[in-house]
Amino acid sequence: MVADTSSTKNISVTLRVWRQNGPSVEGKFVDYKATDLNPNMSFLEMLDVVNDEIERKGEEPIAFAHDCREGICGTCSLVIDGKPHGPHEGVASCQTYVRSFKDGDVIVVEPYRAKPFPVQKDLITDRAAFDQIQQAGGFVSVRTGSACDANAIPIPKEDADLAMDAAACIGCGACVAACKNASAMLFVGAKVSQYALLPQGQPERDKRVLNMVAKMDELGFGNCTNQYECSAACPKTISHDFIARMNSDYLKASFRSAFTAKSSV
Amino acid sequence: MAQLNSAIPPGPLADKWNTHKANLKLVNPVNKRKYKVIVVGAGLAGASVAATMAELGYKVDCVVFHDSPRRAHSIAAQGGINAAKNYQNDGDCVYRLFYDTVKGGDYRSREANVHRLAEVSVNIIDQCVAQGVPFAREYGGLLDNCSFGGAQVSRTFYVRGQTGQQLLLGAYSALSKMIGSGGVVMHNNCEMLELVLVDGQAKGIVVRDLISGEVTRHAGDAVVLATGGYGNVFHLSTYARNSNGTAAWRAYKKGACFANPCYTQIHPTCIPVSGDYQSKLTLMSESLRNDGRIWVPKKAEDCGKDPSTILEEDRDYYLERIYPSFGNLAPRDVSSRAAKRMCDEGRGVGPTKLGVYLDCGDAINRLGADKVRARYGNLFDIYKEITDESAYETPMRIFPAVHYTMGGLWVDYNLMSNIPGLFVLGEANFSDHGANRLGASALMQGLADGYFVVPYTIANYLATQKPGSAPSADDAVFKEAAAKVDETTQRLLNTKGKETGSYFHKRLGKIMWDHCGLARTKEGLEEALKIIPELREEFWANVHVSGSADSLNQALEKAGRVADFLELGELMCRDALTREESCGSHFREEYQYPDGECKRDDENYAHVAAWEYQGEGNTPKRNVEDLTYETVKMSVRSYK
Ligand SMILES: Cc1cc2nc3c(=O)[nH]c(=O)nc-3n(C[C@H](O)[C@H](O)[C@H](O)COP(=O)(O)OP(=O)(O)OC[C@H]3O[C@@H](n4cnc5c(N)ncnc54)[C@H](O)[C@@H]3O)c2cc1C
Ligand code: FES
């Protein structure tokens, strides 16, 4: 395989990277030079190159989370120059490219800073709280094998499309990292709305929103104060309208639950 | 020697699965909770089986190396999932999906398994819709379909370009429900590094916690591997970076046969390599081939020109020319090889000359940019991000890349390997795709195995095990297996050489691509069989892994996986060398028709090659399972 010979000029930058050897030790910024970078290189590939040099010196490479490297698995989670997933809207860290930076830039790279997502090492945080919220109600209870024919319930295309807009969430947690209150309302709102928009989601609609919100509060996520930094940082540009939908569902559900037969709680 | 009994039920093909289900042993509901099943993996196959088994009442432990089950590689599948629903009334049926899959696999898969896959495909769509998977719909509210990857009917269900994501999130939601209710104990960030056998049966695993470094032992009544494919042996591929072959490889070294390891799918529509720093290749879903036309310039001297200046009559739409009835939809192996031939002729495009055009210009003119954006917008966006070019204005450049492994651990009809109690599902097994997989069939297989096959067939095994008879994880075999894991870790850390795991991975990848990639030859494979062991020796003498065993250590994870790839790669080459024919994805240059198509040898190679480990340093044994076709007539696979 041959290297790119395109004419765009290579650049060099300084990476100011958060290094922290474990959850309970203090961290600090360390500078690394990244030189002669092809502008078509991805941000994570730049970290690979820097890590290669660090390893060759016998030191420990910078730990960072990544997997698909195409913006869908939600693993990557860098805060680049203060912004979760970096300078561009609608992309994940792994879809950020060197061409977005200038020769000589000093780029600050940090982990998410949010209490419910503690740092595990360097740039890696623990986002298990999202799984726990999902387990509290982010599903439709349907036993395998018990489903009716898929076309038995037609769903208006507009509803299916809107449900998909919500379902597109990759669970990366950038919404939480971007919010000064570390609120998870966009994440939860998207899941709640996906199901609320579909007929399959109706039977458990009230229970779902109440349980997921309760879990979110229990895990220490903060409140939404309508700044919408979450949507701005979301690599899938999920709309904050879903937060409003969830709030309205939550109110109705709370009201209804006050009148629910005790035997069905 | 391994016993390969395919356990295909008797009777007519179309009745086998139903009859078999009726004859399978059952586990009494009260006893189900006395059995613990260890599921490794939570991609489509793992998440669906773990959730379903827990719903049935079994105790399930699920282990993944990811930080959440939702991040499995299945999440990245773009295009769609097949099912013989015939919602479009275009003549599809179970038999046709079955036949297409067998033919697509170039008559190297097992008829009975494939038929069952086609049968249960319809249930998968019902199940996913019931879970709230927001499939694409028509304005009338019914499900929409497209035709995909070499099919002449519209049987593919899709969710924008994010089908895998939505199907996985559906399975993940079912799994989450069972975790929440205590039916599944989930172990995230845990990598399986050993399979433990007790009296020749799979009874547990040893894992390393990737955060704390702690090595733990897990015992159960059966082990299910749903650990995905091993295409990252090539270093550059469309796989997620952390996908690896370790789980399957460690099972192989415990006696599970590895079937057809050389069958690797090379996908025709990926973004070409741009530099040495490259860490992965990105797929452009082949759904684009429905509306995109593939071409290269007729004259080599035009290859450097701006494509918009190349006149229509100077373009060679080679797939349409060579395969008039399938055209741009010719199956993956056929299209990939055709692209390579064009580049070998000197007509490749782009800076590296390893590329062909995928041109949506006609579709944009015919349908308008908005309609094209609605269909493929996210793919065009991905292309733009990576290459900085707009495919609305200039044709995409694409080139084949490693994408899927049809080979995998050998399993019988019940999806049990030759080790009793070890079940293998999804991409990790070998069973359904023969020598080539059709588009949109991997998602189907993963979910078929997990929701609808193994939950039944595993009972047949468990019913032979006394309830509550699972071994203890403190037994000596478990401790020995854990000691082995520690030993390998220490060996990696203590080598203290000069080169990183990635360095060796890149070198291995190049050997594999050059000698065991799109086209293979006897000489090339023999060369690879000479240099891979040398590289492996160099690895163990000169690898450098920094950090410690008892903390999060990505260099250690990487090096361990590369060490296994260095062995698996050799087995792939050996398999490719001994299969002296061309079939599907396995193209041996010596065996081709004058027009460059695969020349199969049904007389001598209509079989599965199931490799059996014979101990360190010994040549593995090639066992054979003959493939008998009772229903389909084997013919030359032509798409002309
Ligand atoms: C870019 C791309 C697009 C694709 N598009 C399509 C498509 O449109 N249609 C289609 O049908 N197919 C498609 N495929 C193929 C399909 O996505 C995969 O074959 C399928 O998703 C594999 O599912 P799986 O459940 O077998 O494994 P995976 O999804 O790979 O899951 C593997 C699981 O095993 C775990 N695991 C692995 N090893 C270990 C270990 N040692 N210890 C612990 N856990 C382990 C992982 O954590 C993970 O949970 C595509 C593939 C790619 C690469
Ligand atoms: S690595 Fe998967 S979203 Fe970035």
Image: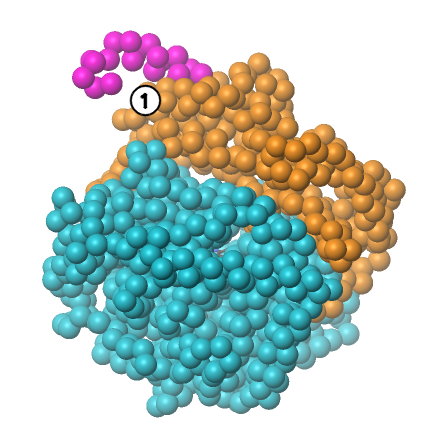
Chain colours: A orange, B cyan
What residue appears at the point 58 percent right and 46 percent down from the top-left corner?
B551
Residue B146 in the image: above or below residue B313 = above
Closer to us: B452 or B136: B452
Identify the subunit bearing mark 1.
Answer: A
Left or right of B237 in this view: B102: left
Residue B442 in view, yes or no: no
Quadrant of the frame with the C terminus of chain A:
top left
Left or right of B488 on screen, residue B391: right
In terms of depth relative to the viewer, which is nearer, B80 or B40?
B40
Measuring from the top left, give residue B381's x and y in whole percent: 62, 46
Whether residue B357 is situated above or below residue A170 in the rendered picture: below
The image shows residue B354 at horizontal and vertical percentages of 68, 69
Asked if residue B211 lies left or right of residue B258, the reply is right
- Residue in view at x 30 percent, y 63 percent: B198
- Residue visible at 42% across and 55% down? B206
Location of residue B2 by image quarter: bottom left
The secondary structure that most of the magenta stretch takes on is helix
> Percent position (x, y) of residue A5?
80, 63
Q: Find the magenta span and give its range.
A: A247-265
Is A258 included in the stretch rendered in magenta?
yes
Q: Which residue does the image show at 52% across and 25% down from the upper left? A: A184
Q: Residues within 10 Å of mark 1 (few under 14, many from 20)?
A: some
Residue B273, percent across and down?
A: 68, 62
Query: Pointer 1: what residue?
Result: A207
Q: Is residue B567 visible?
A: yes
For label 1, the SS is helix
Question: Is the distance from the Cβ of mark 1 to the nearest ligand 1 atom less than 8 Å?
Answer: no
B153 or A68, which is in the foreground?
A68
